[in-house]
Amino acid sequence: MHLAGPVTRVVSLAPSLTEIIFAAGGGHMVAGVTTADDYPPAVNTLPTFSALPVDYENIVALEPDIVFASDQINSARDAQSFAALGIPVYFFSISGINNMLDAIDRMASLLSTETSVSDSLRHSLDSLSQLVHQFSHRPTTLMLVSDETLYSFGQGSYIHDLVARAGGTSVTAQLARRAPVLSDEYVLIKKPQVIIGAFGEDYEASDLMMKHPTWDVVPAVATSKVHSIDAGMFYRPGPRLVQGTWQLARLLHPHLTP
Amino acid sequence: MTRTIAVAAALCALLLLSVGVAVSVGQDLGAGAVRSVLQHHLLFGMGDAPDTTADRIVWLLRMPRALLALLVGGGLAIVGAAMQTLVRNPLAEPYILGVSGGATAGASLFYLGFLPPLVSKSLSMPVAAFLGGLAAITVVYLVAGSARRVSVARLLLAGVAVAALMSSLTSFITLSSPEPDKLRAVLFWLLGSLHYATWDTLAIPAGACTIGFVALMALRRPMDAMLLGEEAAQSLGVSVETTKQLLIVLSAVVTGTLVAVSGAIGFVGLIIPHAVRSVVGVGHQRLLPVCFAAGALFLLWADLAARFLLPSEQLPVGIITALCGVPFFLVLLRRSGYAFG
């Protein structure tokens, strides 16, 4: 990729990439963010534009030197449109936590920034893996997106890697489709010991029972191991995945020391 | 007479067999688990107490779902047959008077939190859907009817127009919803799913289907006469306007209730009456009971197919009814010298 000069203004088309720019030390260069962005708090004061569908007019008005896109959200057609507008686009493909850490390094080199947190994040993951290594118990875990319609994660999702790093076993790892909608029956058969999802604040096992009355015999529900988490730390492939993995480990192993 | 009894017995046996298959298909529960659960519940606690997980799955999830499939399929099929008779148009189906559009808009409004809190507190999603359906069909009826008679052409046009209006309203509501989780739930409901079946929710659709079936059977002779045209029916001594009004009310009650519990499951009410007519003829005496059985079986097997295709997941049955039903229907149309009415 050839850029006309040093990059001073950037625009990201995905909330995960915005977080990666900030982690790579380029937060001051962000000229605008999508309407879905909510982290870090600094984005709240920036101009916003719609990313789905891409609001080209507003993005051109922000005069970015480069636009960052995610191949999970944006299509090649978006790239053509930006090419026609004379704005270079850089596509990131992030499929897991290692990949995400590499993306922070790549972002730092693209933006020629000095400070990057990727090393400390890697270090944090290493110390977690040493702690988790002590536990022989690996609770079976069901990760959900929502409680009513049971959107979950199948083969190829990085969520299973997160659960494994946190010392658990994801029960949906073998499902063939990437974004399955589970049947109530499947959960009854798999008998997960812990159920975790982005269910909102103050969520309890009894709330899940209201939506799925037959689950009283599911171990996670019977022993009140139903936890709600912040979607941004788990389901957005950004730097906070590391923080999320730690939180997950504490939920799965309440005795975890630090 | 003996032939009628034989056919009825065969259909009943087929229904029982299909329910048996429906409660056995899905996640593997281990040998004998399904039988043990059924024995326990149907033979008043005989045999060993079944495994609790198997019991939950077979008796609390699969069984009510199978029964709801029978009710929704059967109910939509008889209402479809009645609507085709009412408007004397082969394209008619239970949703032609805007019920499903209205129900969908009502459910979306409720679900995505666009109703004032005071209203939404006293409602549930099925009730909101039912009221939406009722509102739509009332508008259609008021547009189509005058003091003395209901115009069929105006009924059809008003139905199409109101359905289009409601569908754009639904699109607007879903697109402007700020809550992605609820949006997913609504999308599932829009496609038609039997996933929400429980024993408690079966009573109301069962009641609506019974009322619908009994009332339509009572109207079988006026409906036969209406196939000849309104004037001919009038000259045969049928009070055409009363019949039309009764059919509209029945359609609103039955379709509204069924859509409220399962979403707008398509094509059952359109293709089953045609398929059945090509076998038993146009007389409502035979058409209605066979329609009910055929619609019930069709939806049950469509739901089985949905569960078989993705055993661990949910696939809205509305997708399957269109996918399997329409090619079958096209073949039927092509092969038989079928003529409507």
Image (tube, coloured by chain):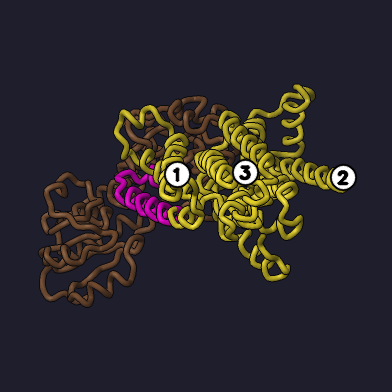
Q: Is residue B78 above or below residue B325?
A: above
Say if residue B277 shows up in the picture: yes
Dominant SS in magenta: helix
The subunit letter for the residue under badge 3 reads B
As helix, strand or loop, the secondary structure at mark 1 comes to: loop
Q: Is residue B25 above or below residue A228?
A: below
Real-space Cα distance between discs 1 and 2?
Answer: 44 Å
| Camera-side mark, 3 or 1 | 1
Asked whether A53 or B299 is in front, the reply is: B299
**What amino acid type should be assigned to the residue bearing mark 1?**
Ala
Asked whether A173 or B47 is in front, the reply is: B47
Q: Is residue B168 above or below residue B126?
A: below
| Camera-side mark, 2 or 3 | 2
**What amino acid type should be assigned to the residue bearing mark 2?**
Met
Pointer 3 residue: B75
Q: Which shade of the palette goes to chain A?
A: brown
Residue B169 at x, y percent in the picture: 35, 50
Residue positioned 71% across, 55% down in the render: B282
Pointer 1 residue: B147
Residue positioned 22% across, 61% down in the render: A107
Q: Residue furthest right?
A: B2
Pointer 2 residue: B1
| Camera-side mark, 1 or 2 | 1
Q: Which shade of the palette goes to chain B?
A: yellow
Residue A203 at x, y percent in the picture: 38, 29
B161 within the magenta span: yes
Q: Which residues are magenta?
A: B159-188
Residue A256 at x, y percent in the picture: 38, 31
